[in-house]
Amino acid sequence: MRNTRRSFIKKSASLAALSIASKNIPAVAGTAAADYVQDGGIQFCLAHFFGMDPRRIELSKQMRVLGAVGGINPKMAGLNDVKPWEYEAILAVKNAWEKEGLTLKVIEGPPALSEKTKLALEGRDEEIENFIKLMKNLAKAGIDTICYNWMPVISWARTTMDRPSRGGALVSAFDYEDIKDKSITQYGAFSKETMWKNLEYFLKAAVPEAEKAGIKLALHPDDPPVDSIRGISRIMTSADAFKRLIEIVPSASNGITLCQGTFATMGEDIPSVIKYFGKREKIHFVHFRDVRGDRNHFEETFHDDGKTDMYQAMKTYHEIGFKGPMRPDHVPTMSGDSNEHPGYSNIGALFAIGYMRGLIESIAKSKS
């Protein structure tokens, strides 16, 4: 009996001491995990550019990547005679995504912004007026980010869509030698000075209206960031060009899409670019991807197989407090998937999201 009582007293004293001591112990991993917000608060999204693909939608929900990036196509919502910048079309498209369990976060490739504005052709002012209507109606519908580009006629360009990569996966690639001698387009030649002038005209008209509406304009770099293609100069081809962009019309609404793969082909240091624009709160949207090569000769890669230190990139987003939308971009086409839409393989997207989610969780929890 005495031994039992003595043992009980010792155990009680030990537990009391442990309880007191534990008040001075820092939070353990379990506590950090309980406080962790998924994806470190970054809004992971997937691109849905080719209609409502049931498989991609289901995979999005299974991964709990509930942000959708896409355009405004009234026909996908059963509307045939409504312009895509009208509120009726925007609301119908937004509701169509919500019915599928997803939230339309970013309009990428906006309507009412084409060659007329970018090349200063007849009808430019009317097109800009429609773009302003689009912004106002997006804001009314609760969508606040537009990813646009300044690549008229020839937008995203690749010379190969099925280059074999790791394990036989297919990737897109670009070789300037294959296109450098092609004829100029039907629009003729455009100098860099002209392209900057046209961009400034657009920004001075659109940015003040975007600011009033609370819309974030996120300009995507020229991809590939070469000097020109078929007579049309490319101007958004360096970090310095984007520094110039944000100074043309200083505004919280005038920002960038930080497409890592394109900045990598420019030869820019990705963490430095993230820090510069992130500290100025100019990163409105991120394309998280990587490449191998330079602006004249490159190929897309798996997220763990390119030239960029992706851990340091994600770590820098976390350090600057980025909480905006981010999507994987241009993933390899993997076994079992069609290469009908190069860069947008469903299985490739699964790999990318898993990689990205692992990066940000390890970074965020180690910081906490």
Image (cartoon, rainbow, N blue to C red):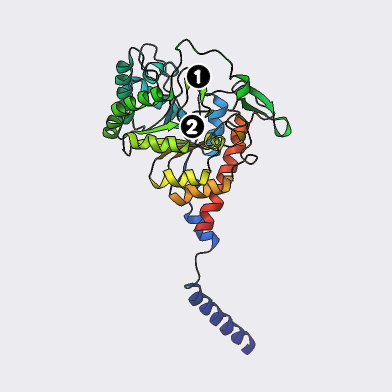
Q: Is residue 105 visible?
A: no
Work out whether 321 lies above or below 332.
below
Q: Position of residue 345 (x, y in %)?
A: 61, 28
Q: Position of residue 176 (x, y in %)?
A: 60, 24
Using the rendered view, name the quadrant where residue 111 is placed: top left
- Helix, strand, or loop for circle 2? loop
Q: Which residue is mark 1?
A: 154
- Helix, strand, or loop for circle 1? loop
Disc 2/disc 1 C-alpha distance (Å):
15 Å
Work out whether 43 lies above or below 165.
below
Q: Nearer the viewer, residue 254 or 4?
A: 254
Q: Which mark lies nearer to you, 2 or 1? A: 2
Residue located 31% across and 38% down the image? 250
The crowd level at tag 1 (other Cα within 10 Å; few <14, some 14-19, many 20+) is few
Residue located 32% across and 25% down the image? 201
Using the rendered view, name the quadrant where residue 194 is placed: top left
Residue located 61% across and 84% down the image? 7
Q: Position of residue 66 (x, y in %)?
A: 48, 36
The crowd level at tag 2 (other Cα within 10 Å; few <14, some 14-19, many 20+) is many
Residue 237: numbered disc: 2
Q: Nearer the viewer, residue 225 or 355?
A: 225
Residue 277: numbered disc: none
Q: Quadrant of the N terminus?
A: bottom right
- The amino acid at mark 1 is Ile
